[in-house]
Image (cartoon, rainbow, N blue to C red):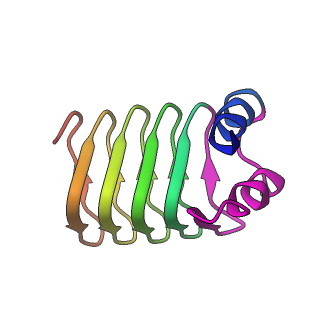
Amino acid sequence: MLKRFYEICAATIGHTRLLNRLVNIHPENEIELSPTASIKRNSTVYGNVELGGGSVIGSRCTVQGNINIQSNVRIDPGTRIDGDVDIDKGTKLNGRNELIGKVSIGKYCAIAPRAR
């Protein structure tokens, strides 16, 4: 039920600190957002996720699993991240990417659109 509530709130008002706190009540989620990070509307974030300062998750993205996103990372719309994923600072995922399983991306990388 909380998952559905989260999806409705994310779709209508976007992600806020209050929504982050509500989601973290659920024992399966531990989401840590930097005050300068942002998650756009219609995106879903579940699991153990850390989002560093200045990072942006675009609209219609799904981020779930054990995810560590460093500072100034840009994830463009339509991207799916699922598994044990580390993305280092300054990296850009250029949209509709899929990172599934154990994935590690270094500093200042640019990943082409639709890369899997």
Relative placement, left or right, of 107 versus 20 is left
Q: What residue appears at the point 72 percent right and 57 percent down from the top-left corner?
A: 20
Check the image and name the residue furthest to the left: 116
Q: What residue appears at the point 23 percent right and 69 percent down from the top-left corner?
A: 104
- Please tell me whether residue 71 is drawn above or below residue 4 in the rendered image: below
On the image, the x and y values in percent for residue 85 come to: 31, 64
On the image, the x and y values in percent for residue 44 come to: 54, 41
Instruction: Depth check: give the residue in front, 14 or 48.
Output: 48
Look at the image and say whether residue 91 sits in the magenta stretch: no
Check the image and name the residue furthest to the right: 18
* Quadrant showing the C terminus: top left
Instruction: Depth check: give the residue in front, 4 or 52.
Output: 4
The residue stretch that appears in magenta: 13-41
On the image, the x and y values in percent for residue 69 come to: 44, 66
- Please tell me whether residue 92 is drawn above or below residue 30 in the rendered image: above
Q: What residue appears at the point 46 percent right and 38 percent down from the top-left corner?
A: 61
- Please tell me whether residue 41 is drawn above or below residue 87 in the rendered image: above
